[in-house]
Image (cartoon, rainbow, N blue to C red):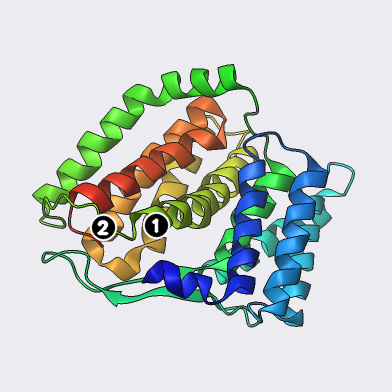
């Protein structure tokens, strides 16, 4: 039924497909003409479908300019600091959907995935996805060669196993989740939404922006890496406080692992991959959400 509803609004669907293609293209081979073209097509379709309006387009343009200025050493430190503040503020507002002009598409409404799960909603958050796309496209390097992907996967394999054991184990001990193996018919669309609209966006902001630049700011201090890692992990946990204290604790632990992966590899793909694996395991093997 969910797929029928998506097909009932082909313009909106096309807008989100082109947005997803734009994000995905960054991890195949980052060519500015390609991701920008795909993104502009998505914006045009989203405007036609009334998923965004002129206010949203203005915010997107200003956000893009702020990221561009931030990572350009040719601008003064003062100007880049102001730009960094705008990137931080706009990202947070986009994450919590507090900027007018976006009509995020609710594609799943109050369904229960299993007997042990609570009702669940799923949105295609155009605003949140923009954060991941633009931060990665304009300020982060990505892996574009197969051998580099394989090297990165080998490096994070032990950490991924640790993440699985520690996060799931603690969640089970805290009675936050129950073992509940299932393959729901929403899984296919969930995979794309969670990977490109959640994991990419959150890792780009928390690791690719916050952790990266906080580490630079504190670089003169002995424990700059540890301080930035711990601080951003706590911020990541606080960001998930709406799910309750236990969820915040689990998110803090997860954030620390994702941040450590990014610190060790300096590849945003490493934290995105572990984040997605944890989320995917959650929906398949445990009560969700």
272 sits left or right of 177 in the view: right
What percent of the width, then of the height, locates residue 201?
Answer: 54, 54
Q: Is residue 37 above or below residue 243?
A: above
Quadrant location of residue 16? bottom right
- Residue at x 27%, y 45% (from the top left corner): 281
Q: Quarter holding the C terminus?
A: bottom left
Q: Residue at x 50, y 23 (%)?
A: 152
Query: Can residue 82 be seen in the rendering of this structure?
Result: no
Mark 1 secondary-structure assignment: helix
Q: Which of marks 1 and 2 is nearer the N terminus?
A: 2
In the shown orientation, is residue 182 left or right of residue 199?
left
Q: Residue 20, image x and y in percent?
A: 60, 54
User: Which one is in front, 237 or 34?
Assistant: 34
Residue at 33 percent across and 52 percent down: it is 251
Which structural element holds mark 2?
loop
Disc ID at residue 190: 1
Residue at label 2?
184
For residue 268, side relative to residue 238 (left or right): right
Q: Are marks 1 and 2 in contact (CB under 8 Å)?
A: yes
Look at the image and tell me whether residue 216 can be seen: yes
């Amino acid at each position: 039924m969910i797929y029928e509803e998506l097909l009932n609004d082909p313009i909106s669907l096309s807008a989100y497909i082109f947005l997803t293609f734009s994000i995905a293209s960054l991890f195949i081979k980052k060519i500015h003409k390609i991701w920008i073209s795909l993104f502009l097509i998505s914006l045009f379709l989203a405007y036609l479908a009334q998923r965004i309006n002129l206010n949203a387009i203005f915010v997107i343009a200003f956000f893009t300019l702020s990221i561009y200025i931030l990572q350009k050493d040719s601008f003064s430190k003062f100007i880049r600091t102001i730009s960094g503040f705008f990137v931080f503020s706009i990202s947070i507002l986009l994450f919590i959907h507090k900027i007018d002009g976006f009509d995020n598409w609710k594609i799943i409404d109050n369904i229960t995935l299993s007997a042990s799960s609570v009702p669940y909603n799923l949105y295609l958050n155009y605003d949140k996805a923009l954060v991941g796309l633009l931060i990665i496209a304009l300020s982060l390097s990505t892996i574009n060669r197969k051998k580099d992907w394989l090297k990165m996967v080998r490096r994070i394999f032990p950490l991924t196993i640790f993440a699985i054991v520690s996060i799931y184990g603690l969640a089970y001990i805290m009675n936050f989740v129950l073992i509940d193996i299932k393959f729901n018919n929403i899984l296919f669309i969930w995979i794309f939404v969670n990977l490109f609209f959640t994991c990419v966006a959150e890792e780009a902001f928390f690791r690719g922006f916050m952790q990266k630049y906080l580490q630079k700011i504190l670089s003169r201090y002995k424990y700059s890496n540890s301080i930035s890692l711990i601080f951003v992990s706590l911020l990541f946990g606080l960001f998930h406080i709406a799910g309750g204290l236990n969820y915040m604790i689990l998110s803090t632990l997860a954030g620390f692992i994702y941040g450590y992966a990014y610190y060790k590899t300096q590849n945003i793909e490493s934290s995105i991959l572990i984040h997605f694996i944890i989320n995917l395991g959650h929906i398949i093997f445990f009560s969700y959400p």
